[in-house]
Amino acid sequence: MHGDAQTAVGLEPHLAEILESITDAVIILNREGTIVHMNRAAERLSQRPREAMIGRPTWEAFAEAFTPELLRQYRRAAEERVPMTLEAYYPPLRVWVEVHVSPWSGGLTLLCTDVTARKRAEEERAEALEREQQARAQAQEAMRRMETILESMTDAFFALDAQARFVYVNRRAAEIWQIDRSRLIGRSVWEVFPQFVGSEMQEAYREILHNKQPLAIEFYYPPTDTWVSLRAYPTEDGIAGYFMDITQRKRAEEERERLLADLQEANRAREDILRTVSHDLRNPLASILGQAELLERRLAGVGAERELHSAETIAASARRMNTMIQDLVDMARSESGQLRLERRRVDLRAFASDLKERLAATLDTARIDLQVPEGLPPLLADPDRLDRILTNLWTNALKYSTPGTPVTVHARLEDGWVITSVTDRGPGIPPEDLPRLFQRYFRPRGGERREGVGLGLYITRMLVEAHGGRVWAESQLGVGSTFSFSLPVAEG
């Protein structure tokens, strides 16, 4: 094949040897643009054997590099027989090649040099220059934005050099000082404000320059009955600072402290009342309930029906009074943020079953149908408060539903919460009453007047929300109501 190539272009053996010794790639084309010779350097550059390249049109052999513009320039060199230098990118090898095109009597000679390193260096220089230009433009834009921000600030801003001379003062500072900025720039702050010489302000300035640390101070300025907040920061040439009138804030803080002291005093008074209600009222009530229950047991076997009924009435009234007292105590503590929960893991199925048995003496719990599935994960709840929640909802359901009808208790797991629902077969609640149902002292309109003061559902809501859950009601007139609440599942 080599001999054919040499014959085709009329190369003498010694000339072919010279071409082989050239370190740049040499490719010789005939007038049709067909490769008739390529040296070893061309093989290395193209990473293809010359046997696979010789005899093929150059635009076919190097099709990936022949862009329309490059092909146009190549054809111009061939047609006009003028030397030229071209650059081409060869994607398969990711290299840039500088091609010196020289016409000869039989076609073209291509001297190809790998200039990838140079091109990359040029690209890097161009990118670096572009980055520098972008950085300069961004810096200028940042300075413009900063000046716009400083001029539009509602706080006063200023900058001083190392000799305490003003180098910048924003519009707000000039307004507050009522001094034209042209009279401030270049003058010492101690010259403009001689009253600060020897004051804590001058000491603060020296401290910032010495320690190179920002400083914030608040001080009262008697001449204008004003509180001022000053924040200053060290810079390369001095300090920058801004200040604001904080008189309103200071007055508000003083008022807040006064109100807080009043609130603390009110909370102490509330606690005194709670202790009185909890202790001084419940203790004698416990004695009344105990005596009434004793009378019930003694009268039950002697046939004194009238007296037994009276004893039962006293006991029931004492229990209702005790519930009302507990409602008032819990309501007051919840509203003041003093309600404390003793959370623990609670098996809802076992807890509800036990509560149903314990309430059998005072409620018609035989009507309560517990449908709590086995395998339900335990709750994280305060058992005493859960007792109150269920008792309130069961009591309401039994009280407001038709005697003899069931009250169904369902429970299900939903996204890390246990949803417990209590459904009755009562007359239902008017739709306009549902949004207010859990408000304090609210009682639905219409229907039979029931005992109580309207705190049960409100207390239920407060206790559920104290656990992080929520409570809601759904109702249909003539069908019944469902009260539901969510409590978190215990982790682990």
Image (tube, rainbow, N blue to C red):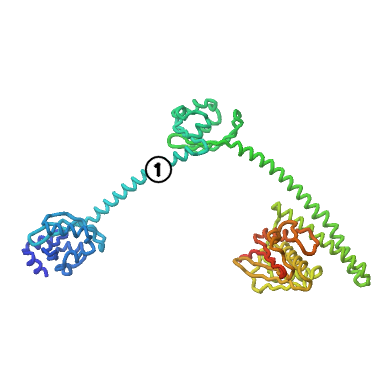
Q: Amino acid at mark 1?
A: Glu
| 47 lies above or below 129 | below
Q: Is residue 351 visible?
A: no
Q: Give percent across and percent down for residue 241.
A: 50, 36
Q: Quadrant of residue 45?
A: bottom left
Residue neighbourhood size for the residue with mark 1, other residues' Cα within 10 Å, grouped as few (<14), some (14–19), many (≥20): few
Q: Give percent across and percent down for residue 352.
A: 72, 69
Q: Quadrant of residue 300?
A: bottom right
- Quarter of the image for the N terminus: give it: bottom left
Q: Give percent across and percent down for residue 488.
A: 64, 64
Q: Is residue 407 visible?
A: yes
Total numbered labels: 1
Q: Is residue 313 left or right of residue 219?
A: right
Callout 1: helix, strand or loop?
A: helix
Residue pictured at 16% horizontal, 63% vertical? 40
Question: Which sits in the foreground, 169 or 114?
Answer: 169
Residue pictured at 31% horizontal, 50% vertical? 127
- Quarter of the image for the C terminus: give it: bottom right
Q: Give percent across and percent down for residue 409.
A: 70, 70
Q: Is residue 119 left or right of residue 430?
A: left
Q: Is residue 264 left or right of residue 125?
A: right
| 176 lies above or below 390 | above
Question: Which sits in the foreground, 331 or 346?
Answer: 331
Q: Is residue 376 left or right of residue 440?
A: left
Q: Which residue is mark 1?
A: 141
